[in-house]
Image (spheres, grey):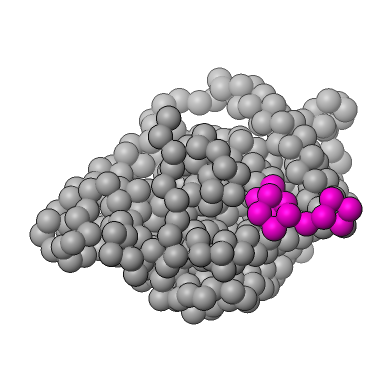
Amino acid sequence: MAHPPQAERFPESAPDADAGVLFVLESKGKWWHAGFHLTTAIVGPTILTLPYVFRGLGWGLGFTCLTVMGLVTFYSYYLMSKVLDHCEKGGRRHIRFRELAADVLGSGWMFYFVILIQTAINTGVGIGAILLASECLQLPTFHSLRHINLASLLLSLGYTFLVVGACINAGLSKNAPSKDYSLESSKSSRLFSAFTSISIIAAIFGNGILPEIQATLAPPATGKMVKGLLMCYSVIFVTFYSAAASGYWAFGNKAESNILKSLLPDNGPSFAPALVVGLAVLFVLLQLFAIGLVYSQVAFEIMEKKSADVKQGMFSKRNLIPRIILRTLYVIFCGFMAAMLPFFGDINGVVGAIGFIPLDFILPMLLYNMSLKPPKSSLIYWINITIMVVFTGAGLMGTFSSVRKLILDANKFKLFSSDVVA
């Protein structure tokens, strides 16, 4: 097997830089642009599943898991940023997750493992955010999305506040749903539901493209990513906790996997004004456009690297025509899969367990220990080892419980159905 390419110092300025670097992962951004990208990558409509997550965990364990996994992911992304800074100072500026992992771990197979996981995650998110459509064909660089991702940040705040207000109104109304916060009666069912919920939280916090986001920063990137993370997690704190608490308080163990369906059930009276829910849905759909754009960038970068001629201009006929054709085919594929598999919400836990837990809860700690080599007697070394062991176990259990739920719900699945299975 061929060894993966090694990174060069500031490759975007090198004469032999590939088109994926020059045309997609453009390094011009400020720290707040990274904050916009990170927020769009993490704070999305999946937060509307948080009341459902609490349904499988309860109040105490729900808030505990949400807080612990939030702290772990912030720490993980901070370590990843430190590893990238360390490599840059050593003359190897990595702009792709797959090349960073292969370089630090010294293993060619790791390069292809990360490609596989990243591609699965990003294509899955692309399927869920199919509204990217024609606009995504005309925005070639990640950096060019900064204004769209600012709008995405504001949209996430907008629909969160609307949903929180609607849930509080529903919980206080005279027709308020009965509040039952009890968990499943069977111990085994409670255990499986808990690990499925943990996997869903991992998917919600997941961000498998941090190196690609840091690549959009104008070098040197040292310290800028931390400021971007602080901006992102400020938005996370406001949105995640308010959505989880209000939705679970209002609907208890009857909360749907999309809380909007609880507010406007198919049967029975609605619990929120249609105008409020309609506006929240509009904000969600608009943000899905930005999310689709962000997560498509890895696929676009791979396509651009293979298809474009770096010696010709970004918008030359030689590069523009293949770009439009390939990106159109990618969007058609995502649209076809989204139409064929209308039960994508049920796969959320599987994606979190198989994809996001290895990429965001395990690999960053391993990369840090391997590259910066903290002493084995140091606290940070053993914190990283502990996190890796705990989340390896959680990932294995989460995979089993999520696949189990998928199998149990298989009788509800119909290809190309207009009804999405919760």
Residue 248, relative to residue 145: is it above or below?
above
- Left or right: where 125 falls relative to 361: left
User: From where the camera sits, is residue 109 visible?
Assistant: yes
- Left or right: where 253 falls relative to 223: right
Quadrant position of residue 27:
bottom left
- Left or right: where 352 falls relative to 177: left
Give the residue displayed 87% in from the left and 57% down from the top: 379
Give the residue displayed 67% in from the left and 24% down from the top: 404
Residue 106, relative to residue 229: is it above or below?
above
Tell me the magenta residue range.
Answer: 365-378
Residue 337, relative to residue 225: is it above or below?
above
Residue 1 image offset from top left, x and y in percent: 43, 30
Give the residue displayed 65% in from the left and 50% down from the top: 367
Which of the pair 159/375 is nearer the observer? Answer: 375
Is 109 a magenta residue?
no
User: From where the camera sits, is residue 56 visible?
Assistant: no
Tell how many labels. 0
Residue 88 image offset from top left, x and y in percent: 54, 66
Which of the pair 24/202 is nearer the observer? Answer: 24
- Left or right: where 312 falls relative to 254: left
Give the residue displayed 18% in from the left and 61% down from the top: 311
Which of the pair 327/192 is nearer the observer? Answer: 327
Q: Quadrant of the C terminus?
A: top right
Residue 176 image offset from top left, x and y in percent: 74, 55
Residue 358 image offset from top left, x and y in percent: 64, 42
Extreme residue in the front direction: 90
